[in-house]
Image (cartoon, rainbow, N blue to C red):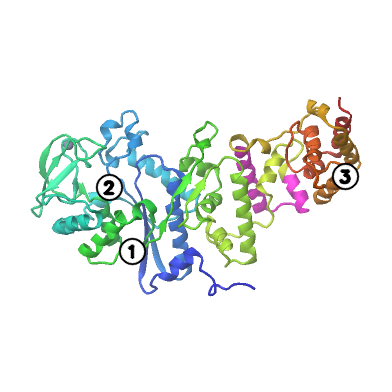
Amino acid sequence: MTQTPTDRELFWADAVAASLPRDIKHVIRDSKTPSGPVPISGLRGPVITDALYRTFREHGLDVRYVFTIDDFDPMDSASMKQQAGMGEQMGKPLFKIPSPEPGKDFARYHAERFLSTFERVGIHPQEIHWLRDLYGSGKLDHEIELVLKNADTVRRVYAEVSHVQKDQSWLPVWVICENCGKIGTTHATDFDGTSVAYECRRDYVSWASGCGHRGRISPFKGNAKLPWNLQWCAMWDYFDVTYEEGGKDLLTAGGSRDRANELYREIWKREPPAGLQHEFFNIGGKKMSTSKGVGASAIELVELYPGEIVRFLLLRTHPKRAVEFDPAGNTLPRLYDEYDRCADAYLEDPRSDFGKSWKLSQLTENAKPILFRVRFGTVADWLQIPSIEPHAEAAKRKKAPLVADESADLDRRIALAKVWLERWAPEEARFAVSSALPPATAMLSGPQREFLTRATAEIGRVTDPEAMQERLYEIAKEVGLTTPEGKVSKAAFEALYYSFIGKHNGPRAAWLLITLDPAFVKQRMTEAARAK
Ligand SMILES: [Zn+2]
């Protein structure tokens, strides 16, 4: 019986959309602090947000997608501190730090690299705002003023929700020190309506050291920023945000999001945006650190994987479940097979959960599944047999020429399979058909030789891989290559792998026998059966 959307649990994105009021204008916001190269895990939030944005619109909600680059944040990254020349930059606003590339600053360099991945994975915020512009132009001045006038409330909420005690003179604003240019090290006090007093303290934070300067300055027009929680509130208010995703680290009880929610209610007198809490995406495995492993940066993986596969990787698991991903081994062929199964599910029922996962993984909203596809693992096998031209082989299988989108899809798989074979494929997935009889064939047993001889008679006669596989099983049983339980023993197929590849394993044997030139196959099997 087919389940209808009413008698089963809703797909996660639909459940979120259904929970939102329909009679207001919605704004969904996401943000990024450009403090260095972004790992692929940094794309989980933006991809989920983009999927929700699409889903909200599909549900008929009036929604705007706003993305902010938090480039006014201080540099506090421990890993960056280790890098040459970075020590003196610690604590400065990211947009004031020199770039690895001339003509840009550090924040712009990393933010632009991150944003370039958006295009490749089909993320399209309607608006992108840089905090340097929002603060610098004075657009957030009224938010800063509101916070400073409610400093006592901020101190109370910090103490109640997060058990952080601030002294009575402390003001929730970070001034840029006029002497050393750092923002993370300043302690501000005494707001008189137009300016604040501040001191740049040497030991204010663990990740940066201030210069000791004292002064008075206006906290407006880009001279200062709000601390993280309050900056969130300022963004929510300024953009009228109604929905905002958050990573798990930010949403734990007593953590930043709870505190921001409370501050928003108390100071802005507004209800904080709704928001799903998504779990971590860990890219991992020990192999990541070896020379063969891919660097974990989003940029690199996004350049190698087709955009649909990146989205699928980040969306196929419910946002509330953590994802462990290791590109080494057979992870990628399995991921691609799963992606294909979801495409089939979409063709069968676009409203199914798998179908929806497929649909949200597409780079454009009106994409349709490619009808004829070749499994990723098969493409990888083809690439290792010199006599096979993948497009011709695919057309042979389809029994018709490939149409343009099928051909383009095959090209994407070929490009990725080449990289996979070179960098991540397990040993058993790599093979090359030997041009000469492999020496290992001298070790073949009597029954293995008998198996080869009988199987040779089928070459050219049986042309369907399933039928050939079936026939190989029968012959193996006839010659006694069976286990004590009566199953076909591995030794049968090993005889074929030794003959063609010189290893004990390889791709699907029947398929190998049918794909290679029949004359060559017959000759090789005959030679192997007699090898000394
Ligand atoms: Zn200073």
- Residue 514: x and y in percent read 82, 44
Q: Position of residue 369 (x, y in %)?
A: 62, 58
Labels 3 and 2 touching (C-beta < 8 A): no
Q: Position of residue 245 (x, y in %)?
A: 39, 58
Which residue lies under the disc numbered 3?
A: 475
Q: Could you tell which of marks 3 and 2 lies nearer the N-terminus? A: 2
Which mark is nearer the camera, 1 or 2? 1
Q: Which of these two is toward me, 410 or 431?
A: 431
Name the kind of residue labelled 3 in the image.
Ile
Which is more N-terminal, label 1 or label 3?
1
Q: Is residue 88 above or below residue 331?
A: above
Q: Circle 2 is placed at which residue position?
A: 132
Q: Quadrant of the N terminus?
A: bottom right
* Membership of 418 in magenta stretch: yes
The three-letter amino acid code for the residue at tag 1 is Pro
> In the drawing, does residue 209 fall left or right of residue 460?
left
Q: Is residue 446 left or right of residue 389?
A: right
The secondary element bearing badge 2 is classed as helix
Left or right, 241 with reference to 423: left
In magenta, the rendered stretch is 391-420
Find residue 475 and report its image quarter: top right
**Mark 2: few/some/many CA within 10 Å (<14, 14-19, 20+):** many
Earlier sequence position, callout 1 versus callout 2: 2
Name the residue type under label 2.
Arg
Q: CA distance from mark 3 to mark 2?
A: 74 Å
Secondary structure, mark 1, is loop
Q: Secondary structure at mark 3?
A: helix
Residue 399 in view, yes or no: yes
